[in-house]
Image: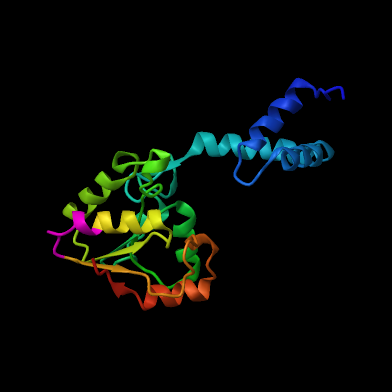
Amino acid sequence: MERLFFPKPIEALREVLKKLPGIGPRSALRLVQYLMRQPSLMGTLSTALSQVAKEVDTCPECGFWKEKNQPLCPICADPRRDEPVLCVVREVTDLIAIEQAGIFRGHYHVLGGVLDPLSGIGEKDLRLETLWRRLRQNTYQEVILALGTSPEAETTAYYIVRSLSDWNGKVTRLSSGIPVGTDLAYVDALTLARCLRDRQSFQV
């Protein structure tokens, strides 16, 4: 069967869409087809992507998103967040999930992943040095390890606990109730709020 050739811009767009998580070749082609039917949406999407690229970057403290003309993200800059607790999460999506649960009033630290030697992710690939600095320079009394329940997340949590053996604060983890291997972004707000409220001391 003769291969179907697309116009070069269409092929380029499809290749970009295929790189998005959860998007395979067929899904990418369906998205291209939908956008071709909605030229105004294509223009709006292009403008939005351009604005994000130009105006948004990562908060140097917590790792959340912020506007480039602001020194910190809205969470780090909020003076009402005075609970002396730092919640360590795997990704920005986990931070968002906890915020939507509406129970936490401390600060966050996004690691940017978890230790995974098989995938080539080591200590230097995560925001661990920034975490140690924040704990040295601030008066946090507790660190919550909310990294999920995968084997890699557990390994990362134990690594952090061992690294904080001489830190004076308390290290806790979310209580049971989150299925093993589940990312926080997929846990319902009620369960997440209960696990955060009933968090437990981390036992090594």
Taking the spot 75% from the left edge, 40% from the top edge, the residue there is 26
Taking the spot 51% from the left edge, 60% from the top edge, the residue there is 185
Let me know if residue 89 appears in the view.
Answer: no
- Does residue 192 appear to the left or right of 77 in the view shown? right
Let me know if residue 123 appears in the view.
Answer: yes
Taking the spot 81% from the left edge, 36% from the top edge, the residue there is 36
- Does residue 204 appear to the left or right of 117 in the view shown? left
Q: Nearer the viewer, residue 70 or 140?
A: 140
Q: Quadrant of residue 162?
A: bottom left
Residue 171 on the magenta span: no
Residue 164 on the magenta span: yes
104 to 65, vertically: above or below: below
6 to 136, vertically: above or below: above
For the record, the magenta segment spans 161-168
Taking the spot 25% from the left edge, 44% from the top edge, the residue there is 129
- The percent position of residue 81, horizontal first and vertical second, equals 33, 65
Q: Nearer the viewer, residue 106 or 77?
A: 106
The colour scheme used here is rainbow
* Quadrant of the frame with the C terminus: bottom left
